[in-house]
Image (cartoon, rainbow, N blue to C red):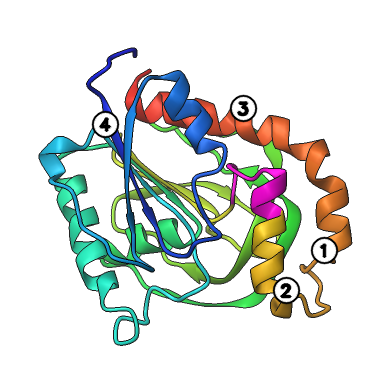
Amino acid sequence: MINQTLRAHYFQHVPFEGPAAIKDWLNQHNYQVSSSHFYSDWQLPKVEDIDLLVVMGGPMSINDEVQYRWLVAEKQFIREMIAAGKPILGICLGAQLIASAMGARVYVNTQKEIGWWPVTAVAADSAVFDFPPSLTVFHWHGETFDLPDGAQLLASSAACTNQAFQLGHNVIGLQFHLESTQSSVEAIIEHCRDELQPARWVQTEQKMLAELMEFTTANHQTLHQILNYLTKA
């Protein structure tokens, strides 16, 4: 799908969680890329001007609307994009924002999941993305979500049941970070190191960095497949 006029927009919530490897795919497919940085001065685009929306992660909760007033506007924009049938990919907090925007509950999980842990595909029909049977992906989350009405579960893990879902033909939410690179993982460790308390599903920063190169190639391949699927590229 090569078209100079295609426009992608991403929502970024903190300076250290940007699109990372997603930018590579956007560049390869000649997208014009714009963004809203909610930690700084921000504006929302017009729904009709956007061909693809990517909603990134962040350490805040989507329930913190009093502290982060922009969450209200962001959820409303997500609802409008879905109503317009536009493609959306949500990453971690982004997946939770999609779920919340569509009326599902987001809440604290029974345990945090941080580091490289496998997710397993859930049996699905041919109408949804064909998630790999098993994929070791990068996690950094302490909350989870219920599935929005009409959504189909794509993947689960031992620590968290709802890891990936699809809503309709154009919306996919991922609780994990397929876009991770060396610099993006180092950045989240630097800014969120206080969360690395010993627990069953929490790796040390040394182990996270040591395993990074083993898993990122397969992660990026799946990321590209998802973006191709959403945009029919």
Q: Amino acid at mark 1?
A: Glu
Residue that mark 1 sits on: 205
x then y, percent, for residue 72: 23, 72
Cα distance in 3D space between marks 4 and 1: 36 Å
Residue that mark 2 sits on: 193
Look at the image and give the residue range highlighted in magenta: 177-185
Task: Decide if residue 126 is in sight here.
Answer: no
The residue at the far bottom in this view is 66
Residue at left offset 72%, top offset 56%: 186
| Front of the two marks 3 and 2 | 2
**Does the magenta-highlighted stretch encompass residue 168?**
no
Q: Which mark is residue 221?
A: 3
x then y, percent, for residue 47: 14, 44
Sooner in the amino-acid sequence: mark 3 or mark 2? 2
Q: Residues within 10 Å of mark 2 (few under 14, many from 20)?
A: few
Camera-side residue of 169 and 182: 182
Q: Residues within 10 Å of mark 3 (few under 14, many from 20)?
A: few
Image position of 185 (left or right of 68): right
> Are the residues tagged 2 and 1 within 8 Å (C-beta)?
yes
Q: Amino acid at mark 2?
A: Arg
